Amino acid sequence: MYQPKSNATINSFTHPVGTTIDRFIIQRQNEFPHASGELSQLLRDLVLASKIISREINRAGLSGIEGITEEENVQGEKQRMLDVIADVRFARALGNGRQVCAILSEERAGIIDTGHVDAKYVNALDPLDGSTNIDTNIAVGTIFSIYRRVSQVGHTFSTSDFLQKGIDQVAAGYILYGSSTMLVYTTGHGVNGFTYEPSLGEYFLSHPNIKQPETGTCYSVNEKYIDSFPQKVKNYLKLCKANNMDTRYVGSLVCDFHRNLLKGGVYIYPQNQKHMQGKLRLLYECNALAFLSEQANGLATDGNKRILETQAEWHHQLVPFYAGSKQMVLSLLNI
C-alpha cells in the first residue's frame, strides 16, 4: 500500500476513514447461512432506506412533516406523517431490491406482497419507533428482523413465513436517529455498530463486537402503571430505588435499548391494566432486540420464558418485554 512521505499536514488529511458497512457486509458474507449474496443485498436495501429517513428526520422541523395523520395503525395508535413516510421508504427500498417476497410493517394491518416470489427472505419491521418524540427532537429509530421463508420459493408467501420463533432469525438490527445516525445489527455472529457520515453518505464501523456489560446502574421503565405491574416487577423496582439506581426512560424503545446495550442496564415493559398482554410487538420489535441482546451477552425474556423461544400466533402479537444486562435481568426474574 502506498504511503506518502511523513508530513504532518498530509498525514492529518490521509488517515484511514475506516471500514464502510458495504465492505463489512461483503467481508462477512461467508457467515450467512446459504450465502449467495441475497442477504447482503437485503441489508444494503435497509441501509439505503435508513439514509433517506435520516435525511427526512433531520429536516422535519423545516419541511412541515412533524404532525399526525387521520389514520391509525393496527394497534389503534395515531400515525404520524413520518411513520407513513418511513413505512413507504422502507417498503419501496425492499421491494426494489427484490430480495424479500413479503414485508410485515407495524404501520399496516396486512402483509405487503412484493410480488417477488423467487425471493428467499421476508422482512418484519417497525419503520419508525418512538415517532411521538419527533416534535420534541428526541431520538427515534427503526427496528428490523429478517427470516428465511419457510414457504416454497417460486410461490406466493405464507403467513407462516412470519410466524417463526425469534431463534430462526437470520439477521436483525435497528437504526437510531439521534445526535448521529447509527445502525446496529447481527447475523448471529456478534453485534456490530456503524455510524453514518452524512458528508460522505456512508456508514462506517464505529462499534465493533459490542458486548453488553454484565450489570449496570440504570433501569428503563414507564412507571405510569406501576400499581398494576406484576409483583416481582414492583419488588425489583423497589430494590433498584433502594440501591440508588438511575431511571432512564424517554419512550423511544430503540433509544432506551441502545443506551443500556452500550452502558449496561435493563429495559422493562411488563403487562399492566391497560395492556394486559404487554404493549410491544413480538415479531418486529422484541424478537429483533432479543436477538441483539443475546448476541451481545445480554438476556431477553417475557418474564417467564426466553423471548426467542416464543411461538407467534398472530403477526401483530404483543408480549411483555424485559431485556438488558444479564445479571440485572436474572435478578428481576429471581427476586
Image: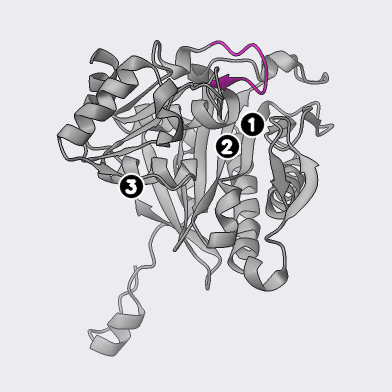
Can you name the residue that lies furthest to the front here? Answer: 227
Q: Quadrant of the N terminus?
A: bottom left
Going by the numbered disc 3, the residue's amino acid type is: Pro
Quadrant of the image occupied by residue 270? top left
Going by the numbered disc 1, the residue's amino acid type is: Ala
Point 65% across, 59% down: residue: 52
Mark pair 1, 2: CA separation: 6 Å
Mark pair 3, 2: CA separation: 19 Å
- Work out whether residue 299 can be spotted: yes
For the residues bearing labels 1 and 2, Cβ distance under 8 angstroms: yes
Dot 3 falls on a residue whose secondary structure is loop
Point 26% across, 45% down: residue: 263
Quadrant of the image occupied by residue 53? bottom right
Q: Which residue is mark 1?
A: 124
Q: Position of residue 162 (x, y in %)?
A: 66, 20
Q: Position of residue 43 (x, y in %)?
A: 58, 42
Mark pair 1, 3: CA separation: 25 Å
Segment colored magenta: 311-319
Q: Nearer the observer, disc 1 or disc 3?
A: 1
Q: Position of residue 50 (x, y in %)?
A: 60, 53
Q: Which residue is mark 3?
A: 208
Q: Which residue is mark 2?
A: 144
